[in-house]
Image (cartoon, coloured by chain):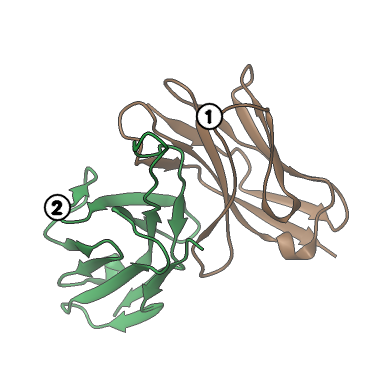
Amino acid sequence: GAVVSQHPSWVICKSGTSVKIECRSLDFQATTMFWYRQFPKQSLMLMATSNEGSKATYEQGVEKDKFLINHASLTLSTLTVTSAHPEDSSFYICSARNLFRGLAGDLGTDNEQFFGPGTRLTVL
Amino acid sequence: AQSVAQPEDQVNVAEGNPLTVKCTYSVSGNPYLFWYVQYPNRGLQFLLKYITGDNLVKGSYGFEAEFNKSQTSFHLKKPSALVSDSALYFCAVRDMQYNFNKFYFGSGTKLNVKP
């Protein structure tokens, strides 16, 4: 259980085009999904937090008009890199939190994030 | 602010020998600590986590980690390394004070296990 998929796994595009990356939770409902960016030999940097049915929360320094995030359902979030440029080339990883409710109906706070396999974006 | 540090960019160990990948943390409040492993061109895989309780946490693939509050450390260990353990390892801390959705990752340690 708790599988997260991403599509495509890799994409090459021309500068100026837009690219959409999908993140799906396959066997659980995820009210919250996260988008990370990873540069070569570096750690993951959180770009934004995506909540189903509401606007995404972007980290400082991340352009919301550049990286459009949509979270229309409990199993799907999309990241669109608009007017991509070579500096946008990176490895993009999504993750999802498993919706968990305790016995009292409260949302669990110890459920870890499950990560997708990543999408390698190369902008020529 | 929450942060984790992985002081070693790379760890080399011979197959069959014990391995340790170091992690120290700095948090406000109680630490929720995690270890993840990443294989080339793949996403992160969860290994183990510490929330509360026993300081020695056992995880996937024979890995374990020891939480040490006085030294603010959460080192990853395995008694006998395998070549297949070669990968990139990330320590992470969850922000339980301001935004429990947010994880802070260390810079990663590349583990090389030689046959």
Subunit ID for the residue under disc 1: B
Question: Where residue B16 appears, x then y in whole percent?
Answer: 88, 55
The residue drawn where x is 41% and y is 71% is: A5
Q: Which amino acid does label 1 sit on?
A: Tyr
Subunit ID for the residue under disc 2: A
How far is the residue under mark 1 from the one under mark 2?
A: 33 Å
Q: Nearer the viewer, residue B6 or A103?
A: A103
Mark 1 or 2: in front is: 2
The residue drawn where x is 45% and y is 32% is: B3
Question: Where residue A94 appears, x then y in whole percent?
Answer: 37, 60
**Pointer 2 residue:** A54
**Pointer 1 residue:** B25
List the single residue furthest toward the left: A65
Q: How many marks?
A: 2
The residue drawn where x is 85% and y is 65% is: B115
Q: Nearer the viewer, residue A3 or A124?
A: A3
Element under disc 1: strand
List the single residue furthest toward the top: B70
Q: Is residue B6 left or right of residue A40?
A: right
Question: Where residue A21 appears, x then y in whole percent?
Answer: 29, 72
Q: In this view, does B40 lie to the left or right of A64?
A: right
